[in-house]
Amino acid sequence: MSNIYDNAYSLEQAIRESTEFKNLKEAYEAVMSDSESKEMFESFRDTQLELQEKQMQGLEITEEEVEQARNVVERVQGNPVISKLMEEEQRLNLIIGEISSIITKPLEEVYGFDQEQH
């Protein structure tokens, strides 16, 4: 029986070689090579991280922060280079989610998550 970690590394390599990953990497490089897009994307990412940190700490997010986040999202969505990156990220995340469902299936079977709970 092969080592489970060998299979995990094989899966990692398969993801790296996938069209979806290559498209994501190209889209990311396009964003990073355009100064305006890069600055906008980094602002978007920073805003996301700040709000996530506040949520994890149990702090309230103010209406002002929500509005600021909305403005950043609108600007980012209006940028075709960043929009392309987000689309490619969504495609790859879908695949990773499906893979996660496949590899957690044994746990679901043990705990009966796939059966109707009584």
Image: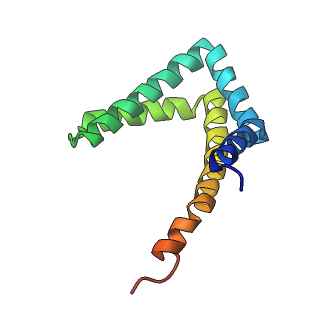
Q: Where is residue 86 in the image (x, y as percent from the top left)?
A: 60, 37
Position of the C terminus, as image quadrant, is bottom left
Q: Which residue is drawn at 39% across and 29% down?
A: 47
Q: Residue furthest top?
A: 35
Residue nearest the viewer, comparing 5 with 54: 5
Q: Residue at x 66, y 14 (%)?
A: 33
Relative to residue 1, is residue 82 drawn left or right?
left
Residue nearest the viewer, comparing 63 with 116: 116
Relative to residue 50, is residue 108 drawn left or right?
right
How is the model colour-coded? rainbow
Please tell me whether residue 68 is drawn above or below residue 90 in the rendered image: above
Position of the N terminus, as image quadrant, is bottom right
Q: Which residue is drawn at 67% across and 40% down?
A: 9
Residue 63 position by quadrant? top left
Relative to residue 37, is residue 55 drawn left or right?
left
Relative to residue 91, is residue 54 drawn left or right?
left
Residue nearest the viewer, comparing 50 with 98: 98
Residue nearest the viewer, comparing 27 with 11: 11
Q: Position of residue 52 (x, y in %)?
A: 35, 38
Q: Position of residue 81 (x, y in %)?
A: 66, 27
